[in-house]
């Protein structure tokens, strides 16, 4: 395989070369998903085969695959497409499940005592690039930023500090900045709720809860990212509740982030919600044009000094990117990188028309597609009432469109499998997995299905 043939200096290879450098893709994964998620999941994905429009990726276990598919598939695809636009799907292959299990087991036996500590320490890394100096202030994040700074000056005054806001608006960045500021004089623990659960389960399996509890309860500053993850997970909530209380009792500062306010957390115990919201709750809103422009300019500056190169984007182009990118700052930066990469590869100064062409695809995909919309378009396309399509009836004229809608919801939105299941009259996520598999298979084998899917997709993208 030729995959490592191109060692380019920057993150992007030109589209004409059509060859992925998996290491570079992995680097992008790390940036996008953060060190924790990357280390525990994405790092273990290998590239097995590369075709023009799809990839076969290797994963260690079935569970691993399902987890990745349900949570990260959209973003993985998005990242891969930054390097090779023609890719429109990925498939997973499980490599030597048994062998790996055996090996894992052996390692666990040997390292019984130290493993949990070591691995937690490994994931407790703060990212030095996400600090207060490069966090740009705007109307939407002003309050969150100022209390994040204040918390560092007056520990335990705002306790817990709870920062909420949608995806990609800077929560993790702020938590990281707090951690960096406090880490020299305090015992700082920084972990995502997902990672917390991973260790929790691992400790239960290994019968090692004592170590787990000790470890998490000794920090004087406890920072936990994306707490909405505990939704619906009873035993995890139980454990977190105890950790939380014992940290509060000994006066540790707790800082939490979530994608929504404590009162709005879904399927979380009431007592938990009231504890989470019992200190200070601040939120980050979507950025206004002014902030987006500031961020673009700052990023250009950073890239220029990092790569020692000149990036020429005139104000029209900057304004265009800022005003078209509606959803969040992560997307904004992604879009900017794409424009920069393009101007680099083609060695030209871009105008707004060029940008429109480069970004057409990106904006179309990110902006408009929701599960509701997919359901409406699909039911119209097949000419069946929406209520019938969502109903429990299993006749094929209803079941197929339903499966197609689930499949598209998975492929075209960032919703997780359980979320999609809920939107389809509370079906289980395994039903969604089944639908995705069935339609993926059919759309390869069956021309009629392929045509239907493509037509529905273009209807969705047109609107
Ligand atoms: P969240 O955790 O809310 O999903 P992140 O903190 O991961 O969002 O932010 C997404 C990206 O946007 C990161 O690269 C982050 O550094 C950047 N970012 C967000 N807000 C700002 C800001 N105000 N100034 C500079 N960069 C920002
Ligand atoms: Mg985050």
Image: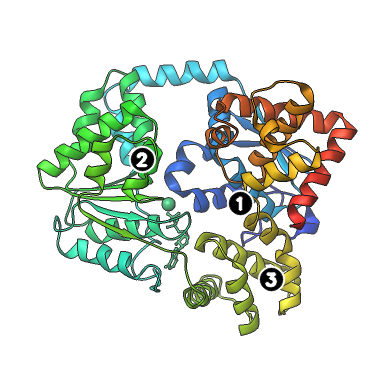
Q: Check residue 193 in the rendering and tell me which mark sits there, or answer none.
A: 2
**Sequence-earlier tag: 1 or 3:** 1
- Could you tell me which residue is drawn at 17 percent across and 65 percent down? 153
Q: Left or right: where does residue 274 sit relative to residue 225?
A: left
The answer to whether the residue bearing label 3 lies less than 8 angstroms from the nearest atom of ligand 1 is no
- Could you tell me which residue is drawn at 79 percent across and 41 percent down? 51
Q: Quick one: quadrant of the C terminus? A: bottom right
Q: Left or right: where does residue 280 sit relative to residue 19?
A: left
Q: Check residue 100 in the rendering and tell me which mark sits there, or answer none.
A: none
Residue for badge 1? 24
- Disc 1 versus disc 2: nearer the observer: 2
Real-space CA distance between mark 1 and mark 3, rounded to the nearest whole angstrom: 17 Å
Where residue 442 sits in the image (x, y, percent)?
80, 28
Tell me whether the residue at label 1 lies in contact with that at label 2, contact meaning CB atoms closer than 8 angstroms: no
Real-space CA distance between mark 2 and mark 3, rounded to the nearest whole angstrom: 39 Å
- Could you tell me which residue is drawn at 61 percent across and 84 percent down? 315
Q: Choose between 16 and 352: the one closer to the eye.
A: 352
Residue 152 figure quarter: bottom left
Q: How is the image coloured?
A: rainbow
Residue 410 figure quarter: top right
The answer to whether the residue bearing label 2 lies less than 8 angstroms from the nearest atom of ligand 2 is no
Q: Check residue 344 in the rendering and tell me which mark sits there, or answer none.
A: 3
**Sequence-earlier tag: 1 or 2:** 1
Q: What SS does tag 1 mark?
A: helix
- Could you tell me which residue is drawn at 18 percent across and 32 percent down? 214
Q: Choose between 100 and 376: the one closer to the eye.
A: 376
Q: What SS does tag 3 mark?
A: helix
Real-space CA distance between mark 1 and mark 2, rounded to the nearest whole angstrom: 27 Å
């Amino acid at each position: 395989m030729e995959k490592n043939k191109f060692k380019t200096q920057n993150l992007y290879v030109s589209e004409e070369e059509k060859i992925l450098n998996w290491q570079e893709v992995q680097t992008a994964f790390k940036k996008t998903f953060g060190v924790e998620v990357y280390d525990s999941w994405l790092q273990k994905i290998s590239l097995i085969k590369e075709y023009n429009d799809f990839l076969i990726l290797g994963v260690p276990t079935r569970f691993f695959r399902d987890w990745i598919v349900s949570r990260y598939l959209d973003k993985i695809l998005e990242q891969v497409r930054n390097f090779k636009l023609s890719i429109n799907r990925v498939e997973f292959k499980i490599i030597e499940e048994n062998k790996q299990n055996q090996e894992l087991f052996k390692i666990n036996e040997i390292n019984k005592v130290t493993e949990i500590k070591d691995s937690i320490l490994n994931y407790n890394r703060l990212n030095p690039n996400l600090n207060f100096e490069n966090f740009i202030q705007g109307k939407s994040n002003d309050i969150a930023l100022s209390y994040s700074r204040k918390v560092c000056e007056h520990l335990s005054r705002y306790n817990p500090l709870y920062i909420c806001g949608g995806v990609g608006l800077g929560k993790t960045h702020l938590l990281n900045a707090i951690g960096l500021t406090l880490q020299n004089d305090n015992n700082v623990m920084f972990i995502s709720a997902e990672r917390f659960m991973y260790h929790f389960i691992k400790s239960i399996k290994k019968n090692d809860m004592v170590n787990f509890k000790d470890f998490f309860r000794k920090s004087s500053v406890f920072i936990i990212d994306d707490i909405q993850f505990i939704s619906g997970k009873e035993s995890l909530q139980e454990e977190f509740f105890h950790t939380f209380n014992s940290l509060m009792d000994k006066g540790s500062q707790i800082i939490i982030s979530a994608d929504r306010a404590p009162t709005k957390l879904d399927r979380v115990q009431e007592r938990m919600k009231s504890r989470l919201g019992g200190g200070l709750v601040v939120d980050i809103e979507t950025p206004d044009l002014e902030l987006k422009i500031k961020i673009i300019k700052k990023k250009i500056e950073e890239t220029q000094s990092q790569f020692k190169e000149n990036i020429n984007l005139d104000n029209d182009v900057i304004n265009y990117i800022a005003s078209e990118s509606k959803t969040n700052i992560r997307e904004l930066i992604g879009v900017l990188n794409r424009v920069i990469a393009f101007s680099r590869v083609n060695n030209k100064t871009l105008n707004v028309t060029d940008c429109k062409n480069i970004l057409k695809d990106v904006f179309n995909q990110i902006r408009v597609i929701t599960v509701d919309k997919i359901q409406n378009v699909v039911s119209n396309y097949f000419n069946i009432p929406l209520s019938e399509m969502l109903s429990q009836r299993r006749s094929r004229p209803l079941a197929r469109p339903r499966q197609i809608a689930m499949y598209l919801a998975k492929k075209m939105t960032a919703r997780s499998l359980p979320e999609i299941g809920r939107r389809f009259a509370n079906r289980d996520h395994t039903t969604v997995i089944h639908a995705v598999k069935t339609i993926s298979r059919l759309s390869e084998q069956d021309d009629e299905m392929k045509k239907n899917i493509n037509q529905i997709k273009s209807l969705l993208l047109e609107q």
